[in-house]
Image: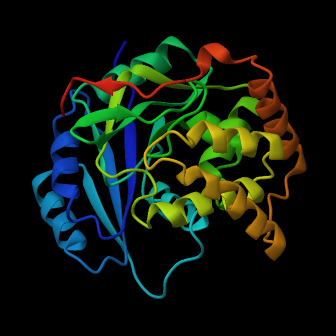
Amino acid sequence: MSPPAYSVITPAHNEAAFLPHVFEAIAAQTLKPTKWVIVDDRSTDDTWALINAAARRYSFIEPLQVQGEPGPALGSNVVRLFNLGCARIVPAATFVVKMDADVLPTPDYFATLLAHFQANPRLGIASGKTYNFQHGTWVLERIADSHVTGACKTYRAACLSEMGGLIPILGWDILDVAQARRHGWHTRSFRDLPLYHLRLTGSATGMVRANLRYGRCYYVIRAHPLFVLAKTLYRALERPYLMSLLIPLGYLMAALRREPRLDEMGLAEFLRREQLDRLRGRTLRQEEWLPRPLSQQP
């Protein structure tokens, strides 16, 4: 059986410090993408020049530049950029990857991940596990096995189509896996596939803002309040310690502002049922309880 085709879409804003390493990581893949659309979102550093230079070196790279006024709010802008990249994939790929511009997959990452897809025809969205560099070592970013990291998500095109695409709101990368499962697809992050995240999640805007944004996100997607409190405690002992205590504050601030929320109530109810199942301990085997250091280096 021949390996399936996949295409990658990477939104990039001021990523000049990381992109050269990411170019090398994709070029080193044992199974290379059919196309890699890199969307420069109004960068003010050398991002656009680096993308064009890489496109001259690697034929599978297609540069795409977004110009004009800043895009809509965080979350919806990511989905908009992803959709712009999808429009450039002709003919449509069997698998579509949304990958950040600061992630390093191992050389066999996509070959191994797509083998998992081939082994399970109902696998709709999947990834490896992300590791952040902290105090001299790579440390696991804890997510449940049923969740898929937002840093590098691979979608089966049929699943993405049945879902109706991504929902353009803050928290899209939580809602997509819930929506997939709601339609009978499986979602999975595999422990044998490390992804090296060169920037700590949330650090681009500062960890105070990031945790307030997490709280706002949970409000917008209508997460169950008990789950929000449990997530706060779960994250409290991660570096930077106790920073997650800002999550409920962000949730409350969004509620007081009456920010627009997910309007698909069926999906919201499904999400809350899943969250309560996790709190009841029905998915214990899927949970990552302790950060794990990784000896392998990128």
> Looking at the picture, how far across and down is residue 60, in whole percent?
24, 49
Quarter of the figure that contains the C terminus: top left
Q: Residue at x 65, y 37 (%)?
A: 177
> Looking at the picture, how far across and down is residue 294, in whole percent?
28, 25
Quarter of the figure that contains the N terminus: top left
Left or right of 110, for residue 21: left
Q: Residue at x 55, y 14 (%)?
A: 120
- Is residue 258 in view from this perspective? no
Please state which of residues 41 and 8 is positioned toward the viewer in this rendering: 41
Residue reaching furthest bottom? 69
Instruction: Say above or below: 152 vs 210.
Output: above
Q: Which residue is drawn at 20% across and 40% down?
A: 25
Q: Which residue is drawn at 65% across and 55% down?
A: 247
Instruction: Say above or below: 103 vs 212.
Output: above
Please state which of residues 40 and 121 is positioned toward the viewer in this rendering: 40
Please state which of residues 297 and 231 is positioned toward the viewer in this rendering: 231
> Looking at the picture, how far across and down is residue 143, in whole percent?
54, 32
- Is residue 104 in view from this perspective? yes
Q: How many labels does the image show?
A: 0
> Looking at the picture, how far across and down is residue 283, in whole percent?
70, 18
Instruction: Say above or below: 36 vs 180.
Output: below
Please state which of residues 137 and 218 is positioned toward the viewer in this rendering: 137
